[in-house]
Image (spheres, rainbow, N blue to C red):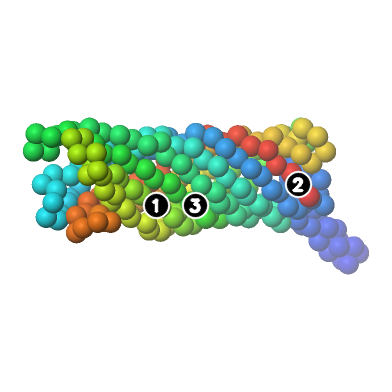
Amino acid sequence: MKKTALMGIRVLLFSLFLTPAGFSGENRFRVGFQAGPFIPADWQIQGQSETGHGGDNFPNIQFSGFGNGTDLLLSIQYDFSSWGIRAESGVRLYETRKLISGTLGLPVKYENRMQVVPAVFSLVRQVRLNDPKLTPYFGIGGGSYFIDMQTKYSISAFPNSGTWLKESKILLGFHTLAGFDYRVYDELFANFEYGYDFAVGDFRLDNVDNDDYINIYDLNLGGTSLRFGVGYRF
């Protein structure tokens, strides 16, 4: 009797913790592609005022910031129960922001470019519903963000005066996410996801031609993402 009861408990625990939610139990892997708009959360990314500068050539350097961005992401997830572990990477492309101001009475043009490559992991909780096609989920995670930032500085009256100030570095950050998969055919699904990430750091953009530089302090590269995608379970 005791053996039968213990066996029943084991079967129950196995069913609760080792069966993925929402899709066929034997399909433990989930791969997906997502794309969508990214909106910076911090005003600093739109136009950073906490800056410093140095060098012998520029008496005043401004930083015009960046516009909104676009996320393009690939992910793979392994479900060991209603929980899953997701690995994700891709690229975030920011809109180029341009600024024209004056230095010593001459119009000066700044052109800022940036892209971010995330490499992050998430712990994802899937929710069981009566509808087998719909699988909501939420999660939290963290990882690294490789940032390539560039500012082009030029004096309008001198077309060949342009020079680049550049910085590349890796920041650590964290994120949250929530969304749902909707099965459209067999194990093929459509996806919608909301995400928020946070990664803060200081940057020094060095001129590639001389000793000029820009310091940018406490710049938050994070923000809100609205991603749409497709994927497959196997």
Q: Quickly name the residue at label 1.
A: 148
Front residue of this view, candidates 201 and 138: 201
Front residue of this view, candidates 110 and 78: 110
Q: Quickly name the residue at label 2.
A: 233
Task: Name the spot of residue 164 as percent of width and height, x first.
Answer: 29, 49
Three-letter amino acid code at disc 3? Answer: Pro
Question: How far apart are the alpha carbons under marks 2 and 3?
Answer: 23 Å
Q: Residue at x 69, y 55 (%)?
A: 78
Q: Earlier in the sequence, mark 2 or mark 3?
A: 3
Task: Name the spot of residue 188 as percent of width and height, x first.
Answer: 76, 39
Mark 2: secondary structure: strand
Nearest to viewer (mark 1 / mark 3): 1
Q: Quickly name the residue at label 3.
A: 118
Q: Is residue 101 visible?
A: yes
Front residue of this view, candidates 8 and 223: 223
Q: Is residue 224 visible?
A: no
Three-letter amino acid code at disc 2? Answer: Arg
Asked whether disc 2 touches disc 3, contact meaning CB atoms under 8 Å apart, the reply is: no
Left or right of 96 in this view: 159: left
Three-letter amino acid code at disc 1? Answer: Asp
Front residue of this view, candidates 204 and 79: 204
Task: Name the spot of residue 136 as percent of width and height, x first.
Answer: 65, 38
Task: Name the spot of residue 181 as percent of width and height, x first.
Answer: 68, 37
Relative to 69, is 80 above or below? below
Q: Earlier in the sequence, mark 1 or mark 2?
A: 1
Left or right of 157 in this view: 170: right
